[in-house]
Image (cartoon, rainbow, N blue to C red):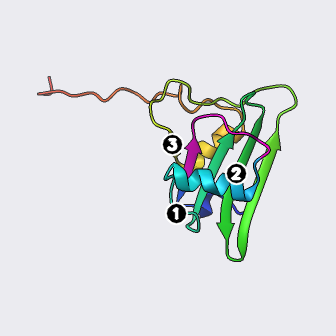
Amino acid sequence: MKALTEFQGVYLHRDPVDMRKAVNGLSEIVEQARMGELRGPHLFVFMGKRRDVIKILYFDRSGFALWYKRLEQDKFPWPKKHGDEVLRITPTQMQWLLEGYDVWKMKPFEEFHFSRVS
């Protein structure tokens, strides 16, 4: 697989997908959900119901590639309460997700606003 930093966008399909689907079936989901340009520099990420399997679809110079990872004990963190069918994350967040971090619970500092300096 190419380095994650080589991709411009990472699109997650929030709802569980039948993990028996291969390139053609997952490509249909990308098009129906309007996840992005299939042949662009993007990763399209899918999760099964049990959240122990993840599939990543992308297009390189010569055709489609499908990357598959199955966890033996844990489950992948996955957005549950998000309203959108498709979520966009950064390549860095994708790396964290693959390493087991819940990128939806990580919160930055709250933005501080002030009117004057005392």
Give the answer, above or below, for where 22 lies relative to 17.
below
Estimate how packed mark 3 is, as few (under 14), some (14 to 19) or many (20 or more) residues with alpha carbons within 10 Å.
Answer: some
Q: Which residue is mark 3?
A: 86
Between 32 and 117, the one nearer to me in the picture = 32
Q: Residue furthest left?
A: 116
Residue type indicated by callout 2? Ile
Residue type indicated by callout 1? Glu
Using the rendered view, name the quadrant where residue 47 is placed: top right
Q: Position of residue 115 (x, y in %)?
A: 12, 27
Q: Give the mark nearest the N terminus, 2 or 3.
A: 2
Left or right: 28 as drawn, with respect to 118: right
Q: Which residue is mark 2?
A: 56
Left or right: 78 as drawn, with respect to 71: left
Q: Which residue is mark 1?
A: 37
Q: Which residue is found at the position 61% from the left and 64% from the top?
A: 6
Q: Which residue is found at the position 58% from the left and 47% from the top?
A: 92
Magenta range: 10-20
Does residue 14 belong to the magenta stretch?
yes
